[in-house]
Amino acid sequence: MTARKPTRSARPRRSARWAKADVEALKLSPEVAWYLESRGYHPPTCPPLIKTPEPSAVRGAVFDPDRADRVVAAFRRLRHTKGRFAGQVFDPDCWQVAYYLAPVFGWVAKSKDTGDYARIVTTAWIELPRKNGKTTLASGTGIYLTGADGEPGAQVVCAATNKDQARFAFDPMKQIVRGSPDLAKHFDPFQSKIIHKASGSVFEPVANVGDAQHGRDLHGGIVDEVHLHKSNDLIEAIETGTGSRVQPLILFITTADAGRRHTPYDEKRSRIEKLARGALKDPTTYGVVFAASADDDPFVEATWKKANPGYGISPTKRFMASAAAKAKDSPAELASFQRLHLGLRTKQQFRYVDLGAWDGNASIVDASRLKGRECFGGLDLGSTSDLTALCWVFPEGDAFDVLLRCWSPEDSIAALDERTARAASNWVAQGWLTTTPGNVTDYDFIEAQIGRDRDEFLVQEIAYDRWNAQQLVNNLVSAGAPMVTMGQGFASMSAPTKDFQRLVLTGSPKHPIIRHGGNPLLRWMVDNLAVVMDPAGNVKPDKANAGDKIDGVVALIMALARALSAREAVGVSAYEDEGLMIV
């Protein structure tokens, strides 16, 4: 790091190609637009869908073109190691300079600790579809931070969720060093680390909190594929390990996730969105998201160009056309294509229930006003160490009031908190989730609650799956509860699962059909819901591929099945099976 004052070059007159470019539409700051023009770049053609403000408003902030030049020059020392470009010099594309290298490395201000000029941005988020040079950006950043950032004894890590994934992210960086003659003079690539000879700086992979914390005084971190991280532990260890460095940088570089809520990816991505729209302000964090819009046609070339800044080079038109053709024939392929190649946060294989439609059905459910009403129950026990759900459905005309009761062992709340950004503790505090002592669910609590509910409501039937339920069911049957077995296969679950989807879509804020009262725990499970389809088009909830727990939704579908069955038995069915609807 140098202490000299950053330089500004005189701004040239606009050339014809830049005079026509709408800098604001391209989401470029005037400083970066000037830098690109002065270095001979054409205007970029693929602005990101989301971009946070550059830190120009920071007191004393200066855009230093020399710093941007230095990092671009360092990247040009890299060599491609794979495919048709193997062995060729890596010259950063205009979009890579415009939306990452220049904004992140060019903006500086005086450090309060040293008085020297230092980078303002310490956290960068780069999200883009596959085949757009993510590995090269990550590798170049890691190598630059290790050996070209003027930081003696820099410690830089490449983080992943397990050792295999860490090697998958680290090995390409090692190959780039070995395949780039200019780098080989300055770096020694070993099996599990890369050492910069002159400064003693080290670049290495980490896959757990212990590795990240052991003797760390981090100058940089590369966190690859953030959506694979199930907890914040490793990420937090890296973030807190940079506290003593003057201008550290943590780069999160990832593709879109599958739309799961309350994950490390979801938290980080949500923060970037809030910064981009001005709901939060943090000049030390910068991020861009390259993606199509949800309403774009996924099968036209204009959408491919919009989502992929490297389109035409990588990914190629041929590749995108082939992937799109496969996506036309399969909902599962379509979801994968939208997530991996268009940057859309698709849910699971089938986006079965639209959350907007679900929210539109919320209405108000007052348990005290349900007393004396006819209802049908669904009981999904799961395992004794996890969530257990009991759902009551109260028919009223063409609508249904929903009352969900959930239990979980109190010892499991900490793990559930990790997966829900601590929402689980709030659910407990607000009464949406009941804990039972110890590390297994105490079925006595459930049995007692069913007894109380039978005293309050006119319980007609309680559907249950025989799995894990025998002793509890025996007790309930002995107490006179109207228990009805219901399997979890296609034959039993397909029709009510389709009914559930159709009724949610039929409802509206003015006329809600599945009235759930905005239960946040149930909403989380609806958001997790995945279905699996057999060759005949039958569907059922798919716990194996769900985003997380869906026990409450399964219990709701079971209860709804019994309510609709009772209605049909007396000839009041208002709905006919119209088949699967993918939304």
Image (cartoon, rainbow, N blue to C red):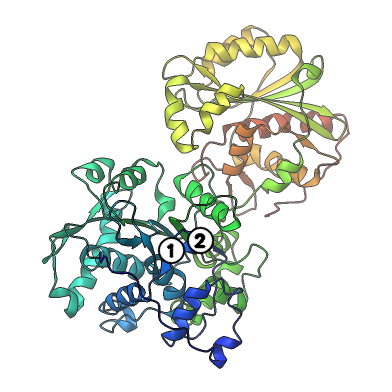
Q: Which residue is mark 1?
A: 61
Q: Marks 1 and 2, Cα distance to the nearest angstrom? A: 7 Å
Relative to 171, residue 64 above or below: below
Of 94 and 545, the residue lying toward us:
94
Picture coordinates of residue 577 (x, y %)? 77, 47
Of 371 and 74, the residue lying toward us:
74
Q: Quadrant of the N terminus?
A: bottom left
The residue that appears at 20% across and 71% down in the rendered structure is 177
The residue that appears at 71% across and 12% down in the rendered structure is 454
Q: Amino acid at mark 1?
A: Ala
Residue contact at pointers 1 and 2, CB within 8 angstroms: yes
Relative to 362, residue 96 above or below: below
Q: Which residue is mark 2?
A: 57
Left or right position of 457 against 521: right
Picture coordinates of residue 402 (x, y %)? 73, 29
The residue that appears at 32% across and 69% down in the rendered structure is 5
